[in-house]
Amino acid sequence: MTEHVAGNGLLNRRGLLKATGAGLAGGVLMPVMAPVSAAEDWMTTSGAPMDEYGAPSKHARLKRVNIGAHPYGSGAGSSSTPLEKLNGTITPNSLHFERHHSGIPDIDPARHTLTIYGETNKKLQFSYEDLLAYPMETHTYFLECSGNSYSNVIFPEAADKTVGELNGLVSCSEWTGVPLHYLLDEAGLNSNANWIVGEGADAAGLTRSIPMKIATKNVMIALFQNGEPLRPAQGYPMRLFVPGSEGNVSVKWLQNIKVQKTAAYTKDETSKYSDLHVDGKADMFSLEMGVKSLITSPSGKMKLNRKGVYEVSGLAWSGAGGINQVEVSADGGNSWATAALQSEHRNLSLMRFRIPWRWEGQPAVLQSRATDDKGNVQPTRAAALAKYSKSNIYHYNGTQSWQVTQAGVVKNVYA
Ligand SMILES: Nc1nc2c(c(=O)[nH]1)N[C@H]1C(S)=C(S)[C@@H](COP(=O)(O)O)O[C@H]1N2
Ligand SMILES: [Mo]
């Protein structure tokens, strides 16, 4: 028999899989065997030829959502990953979220260099070709804009949007590149080399300071994304990649790394990307992204069109390291059950969680709550908002709540 593990229909996964067809909710998990049709076109005629750069099935085309351009320049703005349409943990390159302050530059790698200078013994300049000759590493990391989920912060009423529209400024890729410490070692750091300052070659000249402790830990000059050269939107030919930190410091189209005694206090880290508190003080260089999770299915704008067992599934991540546990509630946080973590354990990466849930037409509020391996627990929306001044939008990691109505309509709610 299937066993309830928390209120309002959350089920024991193992129990569900062991149950007989009769034990399942009206057999909804049983495949319906349709007779094999004798003469579908694709069975009788030869298919399409090979293709130089593959494309998704025309029956499963996906697109980025919530594309918002700045009124003064269409290149500035952001687009979100359609999280509700994806499964697993890797974001296809074509759907990686985008955030550009001045559009996507078209950089010829033969005319682009990376210069490391400042508080170093030597000034070094690397071409793209030079960097390709260095030892590289491959890691799966999430990237999240510190402005992700801003709709749940700024709108007094919960916006009726999809999970991607609300929270899709997060993506996850396998990144390959040169560990920055190799290059810093080669340049030779002076005794007061406390910060690096990364500068992009885009028209925005985005420039961010990173403390040396982080810069020499796991930062890389990323050259490949999910196996192929970086996409122009992600920083081709090279970007700084700072795992676990707010997306803004992963400077795209990277051209300079200046080593300094102090931070640079650039426009990008004083006028923006600082976090205002209620007492008027602001955090600067608050780089680490908090522990967070989202149910991606069922989620906003979906409709449950049958009663029975559903898989509640979503993503969890933390800028502090790995994910220890994700709990799911179907009754607005009154009771919680532990979900199965369904991806290979990886630090600083998206992790997929799943738990079965029986829906018999009852109203429900679905929520998830992640705990990372440093013991940080994802806050409620109220607790996350209370941390900062009302005008602050960055680093929001509060609970995402989905209301399910008796008609099966799934909607963003503040609970
Ligand atoms: N040079 C440069 N680097 C940049 C940006 C930019 O506009 N210019 N945007 C930053 C911001 S705010 C984020 S969230 C990430 C987004 O990276 P993505 O577009 O690859 O998702 O890049 C960061 N690096
Ligand atoms: Mo960002």
Image: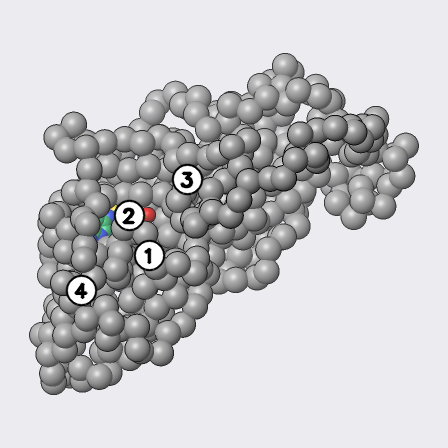
Q: Which badge, 3 or 4, comes first in the chain's sequence?
A: 3
- Image x and y of residue 46, in percent: 63, 39
Secondary structure type for disc 3: loop
Compare residues 76 and 9 and report the one nearer the observer: 76
Q: Which residue is mark 1?
A: 230
Instruction: Say if residue 380 shows up in the picture.
Output: no
Q: Which badge, 4 or 2, comes first in the chain's sequence?
A: 4
Disc number lying in front (1 or 3): 1
Q: Are marks 3 and 2 in contact (CB under 8 Å)?
A: no
Q: Are marks 4 and 2 in contact (CB under 8 Å)?
A: no
Q: Are marks 3 and 4 in contact (CB under 8 Å)?
A: no
Residue type indicated by callout 4? Ala
Disc number lying in front (1 or 4): 4
Cα–Cα gap, marks 3 and 2: 13 Å
Q: Is mark 2 within 8 Å of ligand 1?
A: yes
Residue type indicated by callout 3? Thr
408 left or right, relative to 255? right
Q: Are marks 2 and 1 in contact (CB under 8 Å)?
A: no
Which residue is pictured at 55% across the width and 40% down the height? 48
Q: Which badge, 1 or 4, comes first in the chain's sequence?
A: 4
Disc number lying in front (4 or 2): 4
Which residue is pictured at 33% across the width and 25% down the height? 155
Compare residues 189 and 284 and report the one nearer the observer: 189
Q: Which badge, 1 or 3, comes first in the chain's sequence?
A: 3
Cα–Cα gap, marks 1 and 4: 15 Å
- Numbered label attached to residue 233: 2
Q: Which residue is mark 4?
A: 110
Secondary structure type for disc 1: loop
Q: Quadrant of residue 221?
A: bottom left
